[in-house]
Image (cartoon, grey):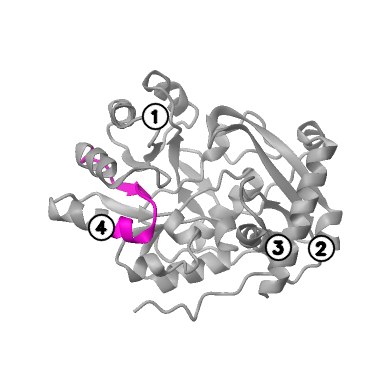
Amino acid sequence: MVDNSHILPLNADVGLEELAANAVAIGLPMNTKFRNTTLREVMLLKGPLGWAEFSPFPEYGPEESAAWLSAAIEAGWHGWPDPVRHQVPVNATVPAVAVDDVEAVLARFGPVPAVKVKVADPDVATDIARVKRVRELLPDAQIRIDANAGYTHQQAFEVITALDFLTYAEQPVAGIEPLAALRADLRATGSSVLIAADEAVRKATDPLAVAQANAADLIVVKVQPLGGVRRALSIVAASGLDAVVSSALDSSVGIAAGVALAASLPKLDHACGLATAALFTTEPATPARAVEGYLTAGPAPQPDPAIIEQLKLPAERQAWWQTRLSKTHSVLSAKA
């Protein structure tokens, strides 16, 4: 039985006026289209302990964005727990690019112990070819796929059984029960590819329901969607499952929180999806670039005021983000 009682509450102890007074919305240009965008919009907040990030995806409403604001409050006003390790292994990320473009994408990351390949776009045959190209270029790397819940049961089964060298498949289908059914079918055929839950954890009303349903072998945890480093740690502990930390396409300010989470996990057996700074052409602060496949834990980097000015979104987008911050803060305060 999974025990929810030890999941920490969201952080809601900073007033809107204080948050809004030191907030700026910027746009990060991307090397490759990712999540159907070439410009990642984020809001940076300056707290007494340093810079923090609030960057729920544009389609998320205030209810879903509340946890993201909680994570920003933790980063800028409370800080993170002490790490148990100072270096975190990271994977490269290959978006759903054409097979011929895979090599150029991988070249941006340098040496890495693992690669995550985005799939479920545009079709199963291309997905399989894309993953096999990664395997061809990096035969010694661990390879995992991420479908963002985009496959049907049959498509996921076809891809995973065709790619039996995968370490794990991340959220191949939508929902907890479909995930459990796919995992059971794979095990019945002798497949040892692990199933990782992402959306089924961060988008569920109960983030531990996936463990209760025996639907995954490990969970993917992201700091912002889960409400902060400490809250994510409490969710991992309560789940009883292994965890891998991933980025929510954060800037390097937000990546620092992801590294803090990975550095604080009692157990870390998988390289983390935190090298996504390589997907941006420009960053507001020193990019979180891996060295020999590792990122080092530490405080969030200090943004350069000149680069912030360069990346600053126009007035109408600043107003949109400020309105979003206000509505989200209202929801977050009601949850406290």
Q: Is residue 127 magenta?
A: no
In the drawing, does residue 130 fall left or right of residue 313?
left
> Which tag is nearer the camera, tag 4 or tag 2?
4
Q: Label 3 to label 1, Cα distance in Å?
A: 38 Å
Quadrant in the picture for residue 25: top right
Quarter of the picture containing the N terminus is bottom left
Three-letter amino acid code at the position of disc 3: Ile
Instruction: Provide the secondary structure element on which disc 2 rests.
Output: helix
Q: Residue at x 50, y 71 (%)?
A: 234
Instruction: Provide the secondary structure element on which disc 3 rests.
Output: helix
Picture disc at residue 73: 3
Picture disc at residue 122: 1
In percent of width and height, residue 110 lies at 46, 31
Picture disc at residue 16: 2
Q: Label 2 to label 3, Cα distance in Å?
A: 11 Å
In percent of width and height, residue 260 lies at 56, 57
User: Which of the two labelled residues, at mark 4 and mark 1, occupies the earlier sequence position?
Assistant: 1
Q: Label 4 to label 1, Cα distance in Å?
A: 24 Å
Three-letter amino acid code at the position of disc 4: Ala
> Which tag is nearer the camera, tag 2 or tag 3?
2
Magenta residue span = 163-180
In the drawing, does residue 179 fall left or right of residue 255?
left
In percent of width and height, residue 30 lies at 60, 30
177 to 277, vertically: above or below? below
Q: Label 4 to label 2, Cα distance in Å?
A: 44 Å
User: Which of the two labelled residues, at mark 2 and mark 3, occupies the earlier sequence position?
Assistant: 2
